[in-house]
Image (tube, rainbow, N blue to C red):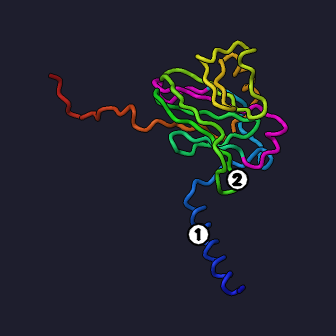
Amino acid sequence: MIRRALPLTLVLLMALNLVACSMAVPRTPGAFIKAASGNTFEPMDTLDPRNAMVYIYRPGNQWGYEEVQAPTFFINEQMLFGLKSGAYTWLELHGGEYDVYARRPFGLLFLKTIFELPMAVNGGETYYFRYSEDQPLDTARLGIDPERYVQAGPLQQVPEALALQEIRNLRLDQAGVYYGGDAYREPRWAPFQTLE
């Protein structure tokens, strides 16, 4: 009986290994493993003035600092980054609409989707998003207009003045991401172009 179970167990382990290798692997350990150690917040210019700058930050707290793996953020099904407690990062986007979501990693697998947000950004503007699973802001008490500032679960868009108060002492977790594809494809310049 043990001899028959051994090949079956081996086949199952190999199949699980193949599935795990084909899935996106979480890249960011939580603050418990390695706290964010980059520079404190400084606003950045976009590479292209037609792009939007999106800052995503996560205020530090005890619960977040005990996290072994940070939530992983995605845009349009592409894995971007994990966000540790007490950290921030940035995302440069062409103006447009994007599907942004975060998933909870567990080892090599993602267990659940934490939030999903259809995000619309205008080129040339700056946006601030606050991520906090256990200490969300009371937007009604703060007078934040829900029509102007979107929220999806623990991710809340916040006004710049409020964001700058909270983000100023946070550290860069990892370099931000430029995402936008070829939305601004420029015509090729020809060296002997004639004017008509």
Residue at image location 80% in from the left, 47% down from the top:
32
Q: Amino acid at mark 1?
A: Ala
Residue 106 location, x and y as percent?
Answer: 70, 53
The tally of labels here is 2
Q: Amino acid at mark 2?
A: Phe
Work out whether 22 lies above or below 12: above
> Which of 177/39 is in front?
177
Residue at image location 61% in from the left, 41% down from the top:
73
Q: Would you say residue 65 sits in the magenta stretch?
A: yes
Residue 77 location, x and y as percent?
Answer: 52, 44
Residue at image location 65% in from the left, 18% down from the top:
160
Work out whether 98 lies above or below 147: below
Work out whether 18 lies above or below 187: below
Residue 143 location, x and y as percent?
Answer: 70, 12
Q: Secondary structure at mark 2?
A: strand
Crowding at label 2, few (<14), some or many (≥20) Cα neighbours within 10 Å?
Answer: some
Q: Would you say residue 7 sits in the magenta stretch?
A: no
User: Range of the magenta residues?
Assistant: 44-69
> Which of 155/92 is in front?
155
Position of residue 163 in the picture relative to residue 50 (left or right): right
Q: Residue 15: which disc?
A: 1
Q: Which residue is mark 2?
A: 106
Location of residue 13 by image quarter = bottom right
